[in-house]
Amino acid sequence: MTQHPDVAEAIVRERLLHDPAVRLSRPRAEALFDPEFTEVGASGRRWTYAEMIAALSELHGGEDGPPIEAGSFAGTVLAPGVVHLTYETVIGVRHARRSSVWRRDAEGALRLYYHQGTLVPDAAERP
């Protein structure tokens, strides 16, 4: 089955957010986040756009920390210009299931509008 082009684009952009070069570049990161972005992180913390942009270079997947290994991507188009992604990450020993909503801005770029991470507490619960 062929993947919808918007889903493929959202996956590419999600993966860019895992790239240390993007995480360390405020302008590159800002281009990927919707100004109305919010997140409920795997830690339970709620993040705003401003908080995420300010902290991104210091969070997991940065220059000195363990890389973000992401896989099992799946996505669906919820409405024109709105994509829901699910995937899983491993960062060091931490495994999480993740959900992101991407939406097109007025210029037509997909930007991350919402993200949520949920820790997988035990390796026995992994698929």
Image (tube, grey):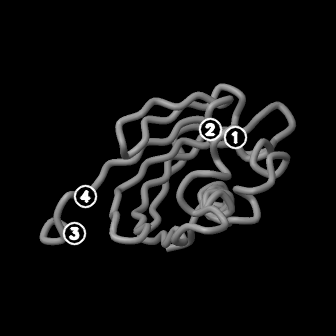
- The answer to whether marks 2 and 1 mark residues whose Cβ atoms lie closer than 8 Å is yes
- The answer to whether marks 2 and 4 mark residues whose Cβ atoms lie closer than 8 Å is no
Q: Secondary structure at mark 3?
A: loop
Q: Residues within 10 Å of mark 2 (few under 14, many from 20)?
A: some
Q: Amino acid under label 2?
A: Met
In the image, residue 74 lies at what x, y percent? Answer: 45, 62
N-terminal-most mark, 2 or 1: 1
Q: Secondary structure at mark 4?
A: loop
Label 1 sits on residue = 33
Total numbered badges shown on the rendered structure: 4
Cα–Cα span, label 4 and label 3: 7 Å
Q: Residues within 10 Å of mark 4 (few under 14, many from 20)?
A: some
Judge from the rendering whether residue 81 lies leftward or rightward of residue 86; answer left or right. Answer: right
Cα–Cα span, label 2 and label 1: 9 Å
Cα–Cα span, label 2 and label 4: 22 Å
N-terminal-most mark, 4 or 3: 4
Label 3 sits on residue = 126
In the image, residue 9 lies at what x, y percent? Answer: 68, 59
- The answer to whether marks 4 and 3 mark residues whose Cβ atoms lie closer than 8 Å is yes
